[in-house]
Image (cartoon, rainbow, N blue to C red):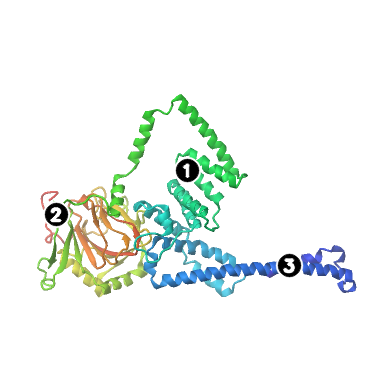
Amino acid sequence: MAFNKIWCTVALGLLLPVSYAHTDFFTSIGHMTDLLNTEKDLVVSLKDYIKAEESKLEQIKKWAEKLDQLTDTATKDPEGFLGHPVNAFKLMKRLNTEWGELENLVLKDMSDGFISNMTIQRQFFPNDEDQTGAAKALLRLQDTYNLDTDTLSRGNLPGVKHKSFLTAEDCFELGKIAYTEADYYHTELWMEQALKQLDEGEVSSADKVYILDYLSYAVYQQGDLAKAMMLTKRLLELDPEHQRANGNMKYFEYIMAKEKEANKSGTDTEDQVEKETEVKKKDYLPERRKYEMLCRGEGLKMTPRRQKRLFCRYYDGNRNPRYILGPVKQEDEWDKPRIVRFLDIISDEEIETVKELAKPRLSRATVHDPETGKLTTAHYRVSKSAWLSGYESPVVSRINTRIQDLTGLDVSTAEELQVANYGVGGQYEPHFDFGRKDEPDAFKELGTGNRIATWLFYMSDVSAGGATVFPEVGASVWPKKGTAVFWYNLFPSGEGDYSTRHAACPVLVGNKWVSNKWLHERGQEFRRPCTLSELE
């Protein structure tokens, strides 16, 4: 295509002296001198083309060298590398956006092999939804773990193996994604970070004018008119002809004048201010605050008196023949609800087998819709999961038997073993495992009653974040590879224990693998007899 442009230029150059269009050029030196000028122009055009192509190839070379080093590091420890949320976000961004830009850059001149391969591979690339999801995960981590934008941008996170940082352009992209979600709070944070990095001298394709345009509007939407005007003035200093900024400035000045008049007339009473403050307080969810505090390792602590009641022990499964001579290590994590942890309960070999069986089947995790009783995806559960049956692997069968022996509950009516892997910022917000009275059809299709208990294996260590927390009581259970935790969701009467409301905190750094077994009521009639008292 590029050479076609050159030959088009040649043709145009030859046609320019119209009076010579049908003349034999060799018969006149005068005519030939015009051709020399045309050729000279073509040589200049050719040199410009070569220079442009060399510049293009230099860009591609730098890109290849950078990616060669990055992928070499990443593929040596894929899970460790992607355990850093910034690395995961930038992978989504590279494959969804930047590789497409590279394709456009080289499309005309690279070999058919590259283009055909690129076309085939593109169908497997992340899309806009993936990039947006990764960006939202970063914002979620920022809120949950109280991270300032500079800390997150510089990649200064606890336990990271492969430190990474966000460029001004990356920060701008995060701000734009927040803006499209009408999340003006995060828009302001990330546009300011992008501006800060540019002011510090970072070389970037991000444009201050665009950043200030988004930033000023986000600030205005949050009610800070004075700051919005200041930012708009700065924008107009860079681009005095910016149409929207000029229009916004006039509007801001008009609003400011009206507010001054209102203040003089005393229309903003103290009662109105108090009312607005009260509304803001009501908008904040107490459970969310407790949940995030527990995720950070803060929040309520158990009293010394209650702690004294927690023990560790060797447990034989109530004299189960398999464990009399080789009891397992068990420790109390919490008293009410009673949460126990089993140590060294699943081997590394078993973990790898379960992961290998699950990986090809992993799909977006679902939740039970209380209205329909059917499984559906939800924004508050960010992970992928797969289900494994005991008959398809002796390892899974052995694990099921182990759960039955140590809980004393019948697993024949339990759900299949669910394996879950949490990605960047992966979480499951506060929820109940059991079906409440207002959702009687929650597990109707299973025909095995409600979920009486939960068994949860931790199949990986997590560098930072990823705790299982119980906001109602203040308990935090931290992942530890090879262990499992167990608790009852129902009282012996069959009533739900609402103190078991729990959540999986976002993974800040690392890769979280878990597997769980939900045991149901049917088959437990003689293993855990029902009581007459509702809360006994």
Q: Residues within 10 Å of mark 2 (few under 14, many from 20)?
A: many
Q: CA distance from mark 1 to mark 2?
A: 54 Å
Q: Secondary structure at mark 3?
A: helix
Q: Which residue is mark 3?
A: 44
- Name which residue type carries label 1: Val
Q: Position of residue 202 (x, y in %)?
A: 52, 57
Q: Which residue is mark 2?
A: 492
Indicate which disc residue 219 carries.
1
Q: Residue at x 29, y 71 (%)?
A: 354
Q: Position of residue 424 (x, y in %)?
A: 38, 60
- Name which residue type carries label 2: Pro
Q: Name the front one of labels 1 and 2.
A: 1
Q: Position of residue 55 (x, y in %)?
A: 62, 67
User: Which of marks 2 and 1 precedes in the sequence?
Assistant: 1
Disc 3 + disc 2, Cβ < 8 Å: no
User: Which of marks 3 and 1 precedes in the sequence?
Assistant: 3
Residue 310 sits above or below residue 534 on the image: below
Q: Secondary structure at mark 2?
A: loop
- Name which residue type carries label 3: Val
Q: CA distance from mark 1 to mark 3?
A: 50 Å
Q: Residue at x 82, y 69 (%)?
A: 35
In the image, is 384 to the left or to the right of 236? left
> Can you see residue 107?
no
Q: Residues within 10 Å of mark 1 (few under 14, many from 20)?
A: many
Residue 239 sits above or below residue 123 on the image: above
